[in-house]
Image: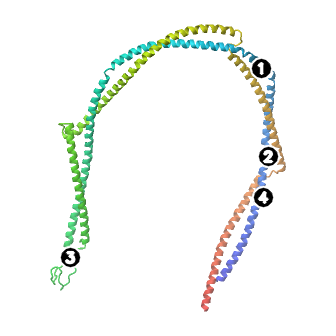
Amino acid sequence: LPVTEVSGLLERLLEEDRSAQKNLDAQLAEIEAQAEQLAGLLTKAQAYRKAAADLKRKEDEQQQQLLQLAKAQSALETAQATLPQQEALAKAITEAELLLPSYDALDAKVKELAAVLKNQAAAQTALQSADTLSAGLTAEITRLKEEHSALAEVGAEKEKLTARRQQDADRAEQLRTLLSDLETLDAQQLLLRQKQAAYLKADAESSRLLQEYETKNKAFLHEQAGILAGTLHEGMPCPVCGSRNHPAPASASEEAPTEADVKKVKKEYEKAQKVTEKASAEASRHHGIVTTAEDAILRQAAQLLPDTPAEAIRETVQIQALTLAARIRQLDGALREIGQKLQRKATLDTLIPRKEEALADAEANRTAAREQIASYRTAAAELEKQTAQLRATLRHSNKTEAEAEKAALQLQLNQLKKALANAEAAVNRGKETLAGIQSAMEQLHKQLEEGTDTDTDALEAEKAALLTRKVAVTAKQRTLHARITTNEAARTNSRATLLNFGSISKLAEQ
C-alpha cells in the first residue's frame, strides 16, 4: 500500500481501539462500583451473623452467671448464720486479753530462773573446760619442750645441705651449658650440610652451563665457514683466503646456534658461576664456625669430663645431668624439711611461753568457776519456789500459751468475718456481672432488629464473579494498550516517511 493509505489505516485503527478502551474503562468502573456495594452488603451480613453468635454466647453466660449468683447467695446465708458465733468469740477474746497482764510476773520469774540456770550451766561448762584445758596444756607443754630439744642441731644441718646443694647446682649449670652448646653444634652442622649441598647443586649447574656454552660456541665457530660460503660467487675473492675460485664451499646447517644463543648461554654460565663461588664461600665460612664450636666443646668436656671420649660426651653429659637433677631434688626436699623445722623451732620459742601463761590462766579460771557454781545453785532454788507458787494461780503455764489461745480465737473470728465479707462481695460482683451481660444482650437484640440476615455464601459467589469479570476486562485493557502503543509508533514512522518523501520530491523539482 502507499504510505498515505497506511497512515490513514493506522489512524482509523487507533480511533477504534481508543473507543474500545473507553468502553472497557467504563465497564471496569461499573465493576468496581458493584464490588464496593457488594463489600458493604457482605460486611453488614457478617456483622449480623456475628451479633447473633454473640447473643447466643451471652445467653449461655447469663445462665452460668445465674447459677453462680445462686451459689454465692447460698454462701452468704451460711456466713450470716455465724453472727452469734462471732459475738461469742469476741467476748472470749476480751476475757483472754484481760488475763494477759497476769502472766508478766510469771514470765519475768521464768526468764530470771532460765538466766540463772544458764549461767550455772555455763559456769559448770567453764569448770569442765578449765579442767580439760589445764590437763591438756600441761601435757602439751611437756611435748613442745621435748620437740624443741630435738630441733637444737637443725641450723647446722641446713648449712651443710645448702653447701652440697650449691655445689651440685653449679655443676648442673655447667652441664646444661655444655649440652646447650652440643645442641647448637648440631644445628650448625645441619646448616653446614645444607650449605655444602647448595654448593654442590650450584657447581653442578655451572658445570652443565659451561659444557653447554663450550658445545654451542664450538658449533657456532664450526658453522662460520658455512655461513661465509653462502656469500661467495665465482670470480669474486674469498674474504678469508682471497681465492677467486670456489670449487667446494661449505654449506650452512639449519640447526647451528646463533651468536646470540652463544652469548645467552655464556651469560647464564657466568651468573651460575657467581652463585657457585658464593655458595663455596658460604660453606667454607660455616665450616670454620663448626670447627671452632667443636674445639670449644672439646675444651669444655676436657674440664668437666676428663678422660671421656669425644663420641661419649653427649651421653655422659645427659646421664650426669639426670643424676644431678635427681640429687638436687632430693636436697631441695631435705632443705624444705629443714626450713620447716627451723620455722617450727622459731614458733616453739614463742609458743611455749604463751602456753605456760595460758596454763596459769586456766588454773585461775577453775577456782572462779567453782565459786560461781555454788552461788547460782542457791539463787536457782529460791526462784523455782517462787515460780511454782505463781503458776498455781494461773490457767496457763506462761504468757505465750495464753497469747496463743487468744490468737487462735482471733484467727477463728477473722476467718468467719472474712468469709462473710467475701460472700457479700461475691454476691455484689455476681449481680454486677449479670447486669453487664443483660445490658450487652439488649444491645445485641437491638442490633439484630435493625439488621437483616443475608445469605453470605451468595454474596461471596457474586463477589468472585465480579473479580473474574474484572480480571478479563483488565486483560483486554492491557492488550488494547499494547496495540495502541504499537500503532502510534507505526503512525509516527509513516508520517516521518511522508515528510522525507516530500523533501526529496522538492529537491528533484529544483
Q: Earlier in the sequence, mark 2 or mark 3?
A: 2
CB under 8 Å between discs 2 and 1? no
Q: If the image is split into quadrants, where does the N terminus sit? A: bottom right
Between marks 1 and 3, how big is the CA–CA gap?
149 Å
Q: Earlier in the sequence, mark 4 or mark 3?
A: 4
Between marks 2 and 1, how big is the CA–CA gap?
55 Å
The amino acid marked with disc number 1 is Leu
Query: Which secondary structure lies at badge 4?
Result: helix
The amino acid marked with disc number 2 is Ala
Q: If the image is split into quadrants, where does the C terminus sit? A: bottom right
Task: Look at the picture and state if 116 lies above or below 207.
Answer: above
Judged left or right of residue 372, residue 99 is right
Which residue lies at the image location 77% right of the left edge and 53% below the top edge? Answer: 43
Instruction: Please give the residue where the numbered disc 4 appears in the rendered image.
Output: 37
Query: Dot 2: within a 10 Å radius of its alpha carbon, few (fewer than 14), some, or many (20 or more) residues?
Result: some
Which residue lies at the image location 66% right of the left edge and 83% below the top edge? Answer: 4
Nearer to us: label 1 or label 3: 1
Query: Which secondary structure lies at badge 3?
Result: helix
Instruction: Please give the residue where the numbered disc 2 appears in the rendered image.
Output: 52
Which residue lies at the image location 25% right of the left edge and 37% below the top edge? Answer: 174
- Along the line of sight, which residue is nearer the eye, 170 or 499? 170
Query: Dot 4: within a 10 Å radius of its alpha carbon, few (fewer than 14), some, or many (20 or more) residues?
Result: few
Instruction: Please give the residue where the numbered disc 3 appears in the rendered image.
Output: 226
Between marks 4 and 3, how big is the CA–CA gap?
111 Å
Between marks 2 and 3, how big is the CA–CA gap?
122 Å
Q: Earlier in the sequence, mark 1 or mark 4?
A: 4
Q: Quadrant of residue 83?
A: top right
- Along the line of sight, which residue is nearer the eye, 101 or 302? 101
Instruction: Please give the residue where the numbered disc 1 appears in the rendered image.
Output: 89
* Res 187 seen here: yes
The amino acid marked with disc number 3 is Gly
Q: Position of residue 446 (x, y in %)?
A: 84, 47
